């Protein structure tokens, strides 16, 4: 019952009482009629709740298919269609909202109406302005209707709703269902329900399709046994593929002297690459790479670069392997080739991107508030007081906590003992609240993250894990291998020495190593980036962050470049180009980066 | 816009008639009250209208010892309920009503023929107009029922004596309260039963769990708080498999 109905009932009762006492016929009749009207509406509303709502059936189609499981690509437009059917006529007003997790971006159309004053004459304009003022007084709030929300305002038995979303980041998507709000036309009564229409999707990372892949014909693309080399060095195949201009770093023996003399320009022979260049991707999925909104995390940039490099390598027949590292585990992927291999890799990246955060040690009021909002959205029927008896308390906040714990106990199927434990143990409550928010698809941001790990400890741990993984990969490596480390090195600069030993080993074994370190601001640490655009707080903070990043980046770059390793502090196309250039070098057998793609 | 303004003017006129008919209130106060009520209507505050009319009736309606009803009170009540409903239906209804009125007036004014409406708009307007008609009928029936109820209930002295006499003569209950109570309890039982039967599996499970927890809350709380206290003090309290094995081996050793 809403406040409208409560006020009317109260006035009806008071008026009836006064009218009967004073013997005022019309007052009594009017008050009793108002009271009776509310009762009639209540009865009608109850009938609708009990007979109309259970008969509603929903079906959701994603890109024209209604399968319960599937996969979607990041960055692409997804068309969603929701179909509603009922065996009885659906009476207005019924509000329907398809619950969309944060990993999907709704396409909200904010159309601005052009002013039409010029058409109107002065008198008309005055009248228009006056009416606008009255309208503004009557309805001051102008709400933009989200595309995933609709209202049924005429009786019908079936309806279709369509909207589009963008996928923001790789991971897992769970579309839980539809939230319904049933109201009577006068707004006296309102009830919320949630109808489960569950569909799960794996969100595969987006990739950049490199346009100019160099011609590489491979008649034999198989790796010889360990220690057996088909050719003396990589890139010098038996069959000539093409002639191109000389670039610094090309071996002198590959120069076509006769052709160079004819053209008066040094030309180099390029041979068929008969040896596959194996690419190792080391993906860092530690805490610092996962924090932030979907699509803006470092891990999203890492996934993009990893998927793009894998696509480019697989498309020319080079196998790709992956090592996915976070604080707790190291997941090693087998050698993958072909389209199926690429799909396996992207699936592994998507599953790796969907991890639950570090367990919270306690809870905060904000965390509880957010969890309560999620409960109101997804479990409105469990919050109904009639079905949810709670211990007595004078304080509203305590009663709210009891209610929240009850819903958690039901959702996670806890025993009554665990239910009481939830009420009194903050650590346990924090854990389950976090789990609830994680299931609801909230990103690793406040309030889900309460205690970030110590950067020094986690940095050392991460470098240790990465170093060990690389060392294992080097131990099993053959010729012409490229090691691509996609990690947030900026947050663990002091611990880089642990990794450098392994990098030196890789270089000593004639492998290529490339470091891709994405930054949070998507800006390269250049001199221009550190100048604040204005004196506003945000710009100053951004500039300060750029200065910090630039200093660390320069130091790190100097140290790595000294060893002969390629480094980029970007998670976008330049990083992909750099890795592809390294692969070219490994394929050609050249030693310098100049002349390679950049 | 113009038609919405006209609607409000008509409502204002009705309110003026309902509130100040037969009174000698100066026009400035009348205008002020009507303006305030219209503002309440624009803000969808229907209780404001009901309160004003109740206050007006409370102050100016003469006291009577007998309940007497006619057509005028019925029309009065239906009009008031319609105004309150109009207020709560909000701006969307006002716009629909305007569109419907324009649609009705189209044949009369040829200048308005260029206003074309879609079939969806037309069906929505038809639905809302049917809804309005049905509601008017419902209110009419409701007011008549309430009127009969008021006449039947022993509210005045004469009615009470009449009830007493008829009750003694018919050998029925002296006071209708008992019958009313039975009907009320029956209705409550029916609706509660309906509500329980519509409960979902999750709601039933939650109810069972919460009720159990509520009955044993004090005991469970005592155990939980004790264990938490020991846990904070650094002692393990969990009864896991190892502890159970250890305990059983110890008890066997003692034997």
Image (tube, rainbow, N blue to C red):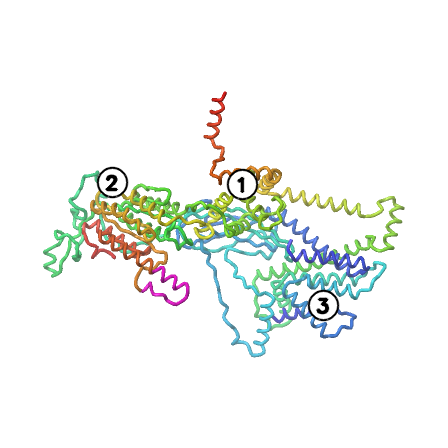
Q: Residue A60: image x %, image y %? A: 49, 49
Q: In this view, does A544 lie to the left or right of B182?
A: left
The residue carrying mark 1 is A421
The residue carrying mark 3 is B15
Residue appearing at x 58%, y 78% in the figure: A123
Give, as a single range, the part of the protein colored magenta. A528-546
Q: Is residue A395 left or right of residue A114?
A: right
Q: Which chain carries label 3?
A: B
> Disc 1 versus disc 3: distance between alpha carbons?
60 Å
Q: Nearer the viewer, residue A17 or A590?
A: A17
Q: Which chain carries label 1?
A: A
Q: In which quarter of the image is residue A230?
A: top left
Figure quadrant of the C terminus of chain A: bottom left
Residue appearing at x 11%, y 61% in the figure: A264
Q: Residue furthest top?
A: B255
The residue carrying mark 2 is A475
Whether residue A11 is visible: yes
Q: CB atoms at circles 1 and 3 under 8 Å apart?
A: no
Secondary structure of the residue carrying tag 1 is helix
Say whether mark 3 and mark 1 are on the same chain: no
Q: Is residue A475 left or right of residue A426?
A: left
Secondary structure of the residue carrying tag 3 is helix
**10 Å crowding of disc 3: few (<14), some (14-19), many (20+):** many
Residue appearing at x 61%, y 72% in the figure: B110
Give yes or no for residue B240 being in the magenta stretch: no
Q: Residue furthest front?
A: B233
């Amino acid at each position: 019952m809403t406040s409208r109905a409560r006020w009317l009932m109260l006035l009806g009762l008071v008026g009836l009482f006064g009218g009967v006492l004073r013997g005022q016929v019309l007052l009594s009749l009017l008050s009793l009629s108002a009271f009776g009207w509310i009762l009639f509406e209540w009865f009608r509303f109850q009938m609708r709740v009990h007979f109309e709502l259970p008969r509603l059936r929903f079906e959701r189609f994603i890109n024209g298919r209604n399968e319960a499981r599937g996969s979607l690509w990041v960055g692409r437009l997804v068309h969603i269609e929701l179909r509603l059917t009922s065996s009885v006529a659906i009476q207005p007003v019924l509000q329907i909202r398809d619950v969309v997790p944060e990993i999907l971006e709704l396409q909200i159309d904010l159309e601005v109406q052009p002013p039409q004053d010029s058409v109107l004459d002065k008198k008309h304009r005055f009248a228009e302005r006056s009416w606008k003022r009255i309208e503004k007084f009557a309805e001051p709030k102008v709400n933009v209707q989200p595309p995933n929300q609709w209202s049924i305002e005429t009786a019908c038995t079936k309806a279709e709703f369509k909207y589009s979303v963008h996928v923001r980041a790789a991971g897992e998507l769970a579309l839980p269902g539809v939230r319904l709000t049933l109201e009577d036309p006068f707004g006296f009564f309102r009830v919320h329900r949630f109808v489960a229409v569950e569909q799960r999707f794996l969100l595969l990372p987006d990739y950049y399709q490199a346009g100019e892949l160099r011609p590489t014909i491979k008649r034999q693309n198989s790796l010889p046994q360990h220690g057996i080399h088909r050719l003396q060095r990589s890139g010098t195949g038996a069959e000539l593929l093409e002639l191109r201009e000389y670039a610094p770093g090309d071996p002198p023996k590959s120069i076509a002297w006769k052709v160079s003399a004819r053209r008066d320009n040094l030309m180099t022979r390029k041979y068929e690459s008969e040896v596959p260049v194996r690419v190792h991707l080391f993906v860092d999925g530690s805490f610092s790479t996962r924090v932030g909104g979907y699509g803006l995390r470092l891990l999203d940039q890492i996934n993009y670069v990893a998927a793009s490099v894998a696509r480019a390598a697989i498309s020319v027949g080079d196998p790709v392997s992956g090592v996915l590292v976070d604080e707790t585990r190291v997941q090693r992927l087998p050698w993958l080739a072909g389209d199926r291999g690429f799909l396996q890799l992207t699936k592994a990246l998507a599953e790796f991107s969907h991890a639950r955060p570090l367990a919270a040690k306690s809870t905060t009021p904000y965390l509880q508030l957010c969890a309560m909002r999620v409960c109101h959205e997804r479990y409105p029927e469990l919050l109904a007081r009639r079905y949810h008896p709670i211990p007595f308390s004078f304080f509203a906040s305590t009663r709210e906590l009891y209610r929240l714990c009850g819903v958690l106990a039901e959702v996670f199927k806890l025993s009554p003992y665990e239910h009481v434990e939830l009420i009194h143990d903050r650590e346990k409550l924090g854990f389950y609240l976090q789990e609830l928010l994680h299931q609801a698809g909230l990103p690793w941001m406040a309030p889900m993250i309460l205690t970030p790990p110590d950067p020094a400890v986690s940095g050392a741990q991460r470098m240790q894990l990465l170093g060990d993984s690389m060392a294992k990969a080097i131990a099993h490596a053959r010729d012409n291998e490229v090691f691509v480390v996609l990690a947030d090195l900026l947050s663990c600069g002091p611990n880089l020495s642990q990794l450098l030993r392994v990098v030196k080993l890789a270089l000593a074994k004639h492998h290529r190593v490339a470091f891709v370190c994405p930054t949070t601001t998507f800006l390269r640490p250049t001199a221009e980036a550190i100048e604040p655009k204005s004196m506003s707080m945000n710009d100053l903070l951004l500039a300060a962050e750029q200065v910090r990043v630039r200093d660390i980046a320069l130091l790190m770059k100097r140290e790595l470049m000294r060893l002969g390793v390629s480094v980029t502090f970007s998670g976008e196309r330049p990083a992909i180009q750099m890795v592809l250039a390294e692969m070219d070098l490994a394929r050609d057998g050249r030693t310098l980066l100049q002349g390679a793609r950049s | 816009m113009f038609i919405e303004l006209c609607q409000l003017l008509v409502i204002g006129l009705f309110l003026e008639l309902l509130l100040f008919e037969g009174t000698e209130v100066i026009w400035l106060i009348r205008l002020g009250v009507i303006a305030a009520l219209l503002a309440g209507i624009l803000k969808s505050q229907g209780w404001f209208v009901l309160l004003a009319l109740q206050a007006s009736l409370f102050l100016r309606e003469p006291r009577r010892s007998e309940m007497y009803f006619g057509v005028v009170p019925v029309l009065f009540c239906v009009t008031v309920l319609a105004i309150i409903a109009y207020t709560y239906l909000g701006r969307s209804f006002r716009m629909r009503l305007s569109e419907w009125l324009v649609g009705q007036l189209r044949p009369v004014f040829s200048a308005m023929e260029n206003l074309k409406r879609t079939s969806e708009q037309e069906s929505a307007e038809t639905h809302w107009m049917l809804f309005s008609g049905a509601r008017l009928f419902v209110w009419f029936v409701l007011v008549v029922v309430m009127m009969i109820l008021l006449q039947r209930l022993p509210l005045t002295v004469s009615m009470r004596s009449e009830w007493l006499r008829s009750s003694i003569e018919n050998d029925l209950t002296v006071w209708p309260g008992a019958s009313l109570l039975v009907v009320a309890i029956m209705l409550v039982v029916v609706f509660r039963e309906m509500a329980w039967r519509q409960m979902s599996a999750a709601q039933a499970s939650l109810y069972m769990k919460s009720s159990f927890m509520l009955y044993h809350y004090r005991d469970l709380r005592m155990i939980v708080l004790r264990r938490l206290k020991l846990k904070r003090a650094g002692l393990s309290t969990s009864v896991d498999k190892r502890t159970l094995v250890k305990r059983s081996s110890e008890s066997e050793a003692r034997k």
